[in-house]
Image: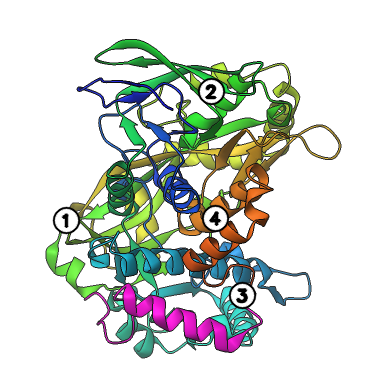
């Protein structure tokens, strides 16, 4: 039995929970919901360092909110030497996003989520390019993607009038002889992951055996002789406290690396982090905002990290329509937006110093890109915006700082180092602890990431009939291949889109 110490100001803390979830973001919320469904007897303690959940990477203003389905993101479809386009990564990400939608739809069906429109809206996804070479690339990409039923709705045009109907701002003030091209998928989405996370956490803490402690920071984590993980914590209101848990999940965004290092597990050795901050231009002119209703992604600049792919982006945040452009990358040594200026320095250890140095040596283009980004003036940023919206003026856009991301640095095959993008699950061999490192498309593919955690950390349980049946109820495509099963894909997608109120009967955001 778990014993409880009541701490009214920060939330109760279970002294001996089965599960401890570090970080109150979308990943912890998703894992908590799944584990409680798979085993209702699990006791779960959630620990969040800030006054509310979902204030860091999951917050609506700290990420792009794109339902990353690889419909518009050109960095998921690489061009080969012969000019053809590899769509394999796009197929994987699209399937993973569909699984996320299935899971969220199952929560709507159960009444866990009362109104899906509070977090997900239908907003078309577009890719947009300029110039003859990129026009050919997009044409080849479209040809490859249309052969796969996952992307069967995609349409393509080089006609300026058609593109103007899709997204009027793209053509406002553009020379009539400029070569442009675009693809469009009407059924794209915009997601407020902060609102979704809050609903999932609210449901979790309404269940028996689940507690949330806020304004409580984990300072130490180590494994005891009985296999349990001891967490030492500091609460803003109540001072020092501790707990012991059978399983620990580190889903603390940029803060995960430090805690993984403190855990001392062999699997965590050699990992480092490269922090990149993001900024967006936000439109202040209501008339301009109303003219645009799409997420329009372009090609990243040479040397830019994938998270810096430029996009002119319709957002729906807390019921209000917004228009953003960016991101503009910046550099801060912090690993979290509310982190410390010493985060990067403190992450340097004997086991990761060689990978860190190797990445610095081999990524000078990225370093130069970040230097150029930091030096940009407001006029420079608006000039970049004009590639998408030629008539943009400096007076109608303001700069906001978005979230902090920590890209993964790890040992490579030659034992030096490489910089990786995406999300990685790092788990101990005994399955008693797991940490998530990295960034995009993280939140959109959270279900597939958490299923990977279950496979690594609960290998025997997940083989059981009880867990298999429950997973199939939550994830109807569990164990299936949507890219190879046309009928199953359309059947499950139709049901999920209807439950989430993003089917064809819903008008796109306008």
Sequence-first tag of 1 and 4: 1
Do residues under tags 4 and 3 come within 8 Å of each other at their CB atoms? Answer: no
Other-residue count near label 4 (Cα within 10 Å), few / some / many at <14 / 14–19 / ≥20: few
The single residue placed furthest to the front in the displayed view is: 1
Residue 102: % across, % down:
45, 69
Which of labels 1 and 3 is toward the front? Answer: 1
The disc at residue 133 is 3
| Element class at badge 4 | loop
Its colouring scheme is rainbow
The disc at residue 284 is 1
**Residue under the point 34% across and 57% down:** 325
In whole angstroms, how far apart are the C-alphas of marks 2 and 1? Answer: 35 Å
In whole angstroms, how far apart are the C-alphas of marks 1 and 3? Answer: 34 Å
Other-residue count near label 2 (Cα within 10 Å), few / some / many at <14 / 14–19 / ≥20: some
Residue 69, visible in the rendered structure: no
**Residue under the point 65% across and 65% down:** 89
In whole angstroms, how far apart are the C-alphas of marks 3 and 2? Answer: 39 Å
Do residues under tags 1 and 3 come within 8 Å of each other at their CB atoms? Answer: no
In whole angstroms, how far apart are the C-alphas of marks 4 and 3? Answer: 15 Å
The single residue placed furthest to the left in the displayed view is: 286
Other-residue count near label 1 (Cα within 10 Å), few / some / many at <14 / 14–19 / ≥20: some
Q: Nearer the viewer, residue 82 or 111?
A: 111
Q: The magenta stretch spans which residues?
A: 482-510
Q: Is residue 22 left or right of residue 198?
A: right
> Above or below — where is 59 with respect to 128?
above
The disc at residue 301 is 4
């Amino acid at each position: 039995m778990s014993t409880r110490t009541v701490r009214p100001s920060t939330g109760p803390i279970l002294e001996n929970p089965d599960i401890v979830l570090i970080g109150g973001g979308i990943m912890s919320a998703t894992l908590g919901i799944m584990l409680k469904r798979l085993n209702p007897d699990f006791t779960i303690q959630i620990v969040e360092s800030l006054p509310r959940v979902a204030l860091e990477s999951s917050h609506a203003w700290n990420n792009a909110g794109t339902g990353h389905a690889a419909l518009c993101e050109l960095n998921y479809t690489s061009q080969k030497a012969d000019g053809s386009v590899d769509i394999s990564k796009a197929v994987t990400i699209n399937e993973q996003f569909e699984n996320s939608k299935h899971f969220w739809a199952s929560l709507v069906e159960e009444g866990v989520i009362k109104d899906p429109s509070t977090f997900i809206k239908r907003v078309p996804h577009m890719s947009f390019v300029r110039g003859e070479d990129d026009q050919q690339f997009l044409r080849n990409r479209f040809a490859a993607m249309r052969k796969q039923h996952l992307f069967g709705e995609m349409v393509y045009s080089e006609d300026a009038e058609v593109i103007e109907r899709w997204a009027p701002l793209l053509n406002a003030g553009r020379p009539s002889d400029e070569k442009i091209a675009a693809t469009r998928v009407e059924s794209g989405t915009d997601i407020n992951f902060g609102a979704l996370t809050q609903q999932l956490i609210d449901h979790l803490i309404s269940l028996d055996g689940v507690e949330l402690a806020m304004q409580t920071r984990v300072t130490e984590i180590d494994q005891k002789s009985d296999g349990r993980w001891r967490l030492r914590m500091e609460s803003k209101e109540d001072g020092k406290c501790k707990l012991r848990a059978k399983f620990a999940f580190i889903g603390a965004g940029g803060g995960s690396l430090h805690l993984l290092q403190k855990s001392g597990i062999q699997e965590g050795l050699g990992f480092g982090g490269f922090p990149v901050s993001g900024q967006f231009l936000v439109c202040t002119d209501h008339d301009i905002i109303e003219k645009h209703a799409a997420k329009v992604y372009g090609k990243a600049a040479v040397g830019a990290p994938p998270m810096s792919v430029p996009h002119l982006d319709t957002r729906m945040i807390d019921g209000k329509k917004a228009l953003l452009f960016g991101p503009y990358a910046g550099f801060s040594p912090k690993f979290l937006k509310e982190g410390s200026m010493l985060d990067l320095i403190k992450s340097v250890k004997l086991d990761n110093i060689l990978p860190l140095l190797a990445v610095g040596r081999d990524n000078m283009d990225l370093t130069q890109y970040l230097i150029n980004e930091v030096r940009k003036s407001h006029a420079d940023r608006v000039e970049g915006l004009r590639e998408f919206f030629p008539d943009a003026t400096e007076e109608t856009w303001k700069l906001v700082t978005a979230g902090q991301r920590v890209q993964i640095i790890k040992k490579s095959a030659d034992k030096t180092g490489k910089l990786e993008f995406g999300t990685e699950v790092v788990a101990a061999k005994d399955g008693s602890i797991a940490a998530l490192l990295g960034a995009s498309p993280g939140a959109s593919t959270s279900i597939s990431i958490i299923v990977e955690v279950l496979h690594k950390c609960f290998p025997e349980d997940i083989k059981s009939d009880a867990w298999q049946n429950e997973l199939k109820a939550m994830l109807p495509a569990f164990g299936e291949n949507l890219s190879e099963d046309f009928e199953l894909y359309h059947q499950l997608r139709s049901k999920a889109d209807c439950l989430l109120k993003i089917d064809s009967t819903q008008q796109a955001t306008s």
